[in-house]
Amino acid sequence: MLERLYNGIIKENPTFVLMLGMCPTMAVTTSGVNAIGMGLSTTVVLVLSNIVISMLRKIIPSEVRIPAFIVVIASFVTVVQMLMQGYMPDLYAALGIYIPLIVVNCIILGRAESWAYKNGVVSSAFDGLGMGLGFTFGITCIGLLREFIGAGTLFSVRILPEAYEGATIFIMAPGAFIVLAFLVALRNKIMSKKPAVEMGCSARCDACVGCDGMKRSGV
């Protein structure tokens, strides 16, 4: 279960690694509030749809699995949309058309096909949670950075002095691509730093700490 969480948040982060769900990532990350609202909405739909699809995986015919997935996902999206419209109208208005578009989000359909349809309920639930939190983390980072540079605020709270006019381009569409590229490069730089391994020969090959390729080749 912890492996599924780690996989979604770090190893296969939907935003920074798999590059899925780019439509809402580019469109709704003009502020931290919008980003975290979209991320949590997607997470709820992802977890619930994974659970239901996993429960029904043995009775859903393979030939019609994609339409079945969409029906399940659309049902939960409708519930989330109605709850958001009733209890969070401002956020609902800000996200607009991108809430119903969760139905065809590549992340949700992808996890339903690659994991929930092939694994148990608990594992599928944690897979959905990990992927959802990874997506939320990714777009929230983008939203906060764009909001801070573009307006000098974080979660609509003024951080920089009023005299700061902001770099408007970061609130516009080009800013999303710039921030995404920077964060992807930063993530890759951090993940590429691996501890150095001491190389050398020893009396026993199975005790060698060298690379596996050298051991297999008999070096």
Image (spheres, helix red, strand yellow):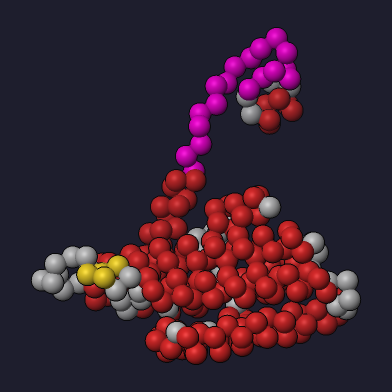
Residue 103, horizontal then vertical, whole percent: 62, 82
Residue 22, horizontal then vertical, whole percent: 51, 73
Q: Is residue 35 left or right of residue 48?
A: left
Q: Which stretch is magenta?
A: 192-209
**46 relative to 138, above or below:** below
Q: Main secondary structure of the magenta part?
A: loop
Please give the name of the residue rendered at 36% of the width and 76% of the height, measured from the top-left corner. Answer: 30
What is the quadrant of residue 198 in the picture?
A: top right
Q: Which residue occupies the extreme front position in the image? A: 87
Along the line of sight, the residue nearer the viewer: 116 or 185: 116
**119 relative to 187, above or below:** below
Residue 208, horizontal then vertical, whole percent: 67, 19
- Asked if one can make out residue 146 in the rendered structure from this viewpoint, the answer is no
Q: Is residue 33 left or right of residue 119?
A: left
Please give the name of the residue rendered at 65% of the width and 69% of the height, measured from the top-left corner. Answer: 47
Along the line of sight, the residue nearer the viewer: 137 or 205: 137
Q: Is residue 38 left or right of residue 119?
A: left
Q: Is residue 201 magenta?
A: yes
Q: Is residue 160 left or right of residue 203?
A: left
- Asked if one can make out residue 50 in the rendered structure from this viewpoint, the answer is yes
**85 relative to 177, above or below:** below
**28 relative to 190, above or below:** below
Along the line of sight, the residue nearer the viewer: 75 or 97: 75
Please give the name of the residue rendered at 65% of the width and 50% of the height, measured from the top-left corner. Answer: 3
